[in-house]
Amino acid sequence: MFTGIIEEMGVVVAIQLEKDNVNFTIEAAFTDQLKVDQSVAHNGCCLTVVDIDKANSSYVVTAIKETLSVTNLSNWKVGTKVNLERSMLMNGRIDGHIVQGHVDCVATCTKVLEENGSWKYDFSHQSKEITVEKGSITINGTSLTVVNSDKDSFSVCIIPYTYHNTNFHEMKLGDTVNLEFDVIGKYVSKWLSVTKSN
């Protein structure tokens, strides 16, 4: 379980293919606090730490074929900056919203607009899930508030802190991002579809 509040940006320092799987080595400042079998969200995708190299401040996670097919991880290269968040502690405030680390789909950035101190990003997607204005959405693991919402598109606004401390500052038109829709909204949507069919 996560909150969507990014702790730091890691960097992909190595990529190794293993059959249909891909092992990513990530360099991150909090590596010395990790342990094998721990969950970490990478651009919003929950992956398990399988190896740690504290001397080089790096750790390894494995993405299977299914994960690669529904996320933007297959686009990563050595040098890619990744938004990172360790799993939530249950003894503090939830500053973002409830995030599971289960990516629902990818979306495409269709517009970036600088607005005199903030940034507005538009995204399009092909998911059956919906967004609502003033509702929550997770983009590359970052908890954000939806500004405008349509059936298959939405926009968010980014404050300077978020812009500089996540990989949004590198995002450009046509880039692919990971989306996780609000889990409460997904349950409501599922419940309505089940009751409607009965």
Image (cartoon, helix red, strand yellow):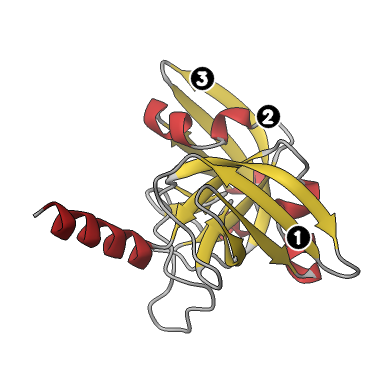
Which mark is nearer the camera, 1 or 3? 1
Q: Are marks 2 and 3 in contact (CB under 8 Å)?
A: no
**Residue at label 3?**
17
In the image, farthest residue toward the top: 19
Q: Residue at x 34, y 67 (%)?
A: 184
CA–CA distance in space, label 2 to label 1: 26 Å
Q: Nearer the viewer, residue 152 or 141?
A: 152
Q: Residue at x 55, y 35 (%)?
A: 73
Quarter holding the C terminus? Answer: bottom left
Q: Nearer the viewer, residue 26 or 187?
A: 187
Q: What is the three-letter code of the residue carrying label 3?
A: Leu
* Looking at the image, residue 135 lies above or below residue 152: below
CA–CA distance in space, label 1 to label 3: 36 Å
**Residue at label 1?**
120
Horizontal relation, residue 13 to residue 178: left or right? right
Q: What is the three-letter code of the residue carrying label 1?
A: Lys
Crowding at dot 3, Cα within 10 Å, few <14 / some 14-19 / many 20+, comes out as: few
Horizontal relation, residue 58 to residue 112: left or right? left
Task: Say which mark, if any, is on residue 108.
Answer: none
Q: Residue at x 41, y 19 (%)?
A: 20
Which mark is nearer the camera, 2 or 3? 2
Q: Are marks 2 and 1 in contact (CB under 8 Å)?
A: no
Q: Nearer the viewer, residue 120 or 43?
A: 120
Q: Are marks 1 and 3 in contact (CB under 8 Å)?
A: no
Of the numbered discs 2 and 1, the one sitting upstream in the chain is: 2
Q: What is the three-letter code of the residue carrying label 2?
A: Lys
**Residue at label 2?**
77
Which mark is nearer the camera, 2 or 1? 1
Quarter holding the N terminus? Answer: bottom left
Measured from the top left, where is residue 151 in percent x and y? Answer: 50, 51
Q: Under tag 1, what secondary structure? A: strand
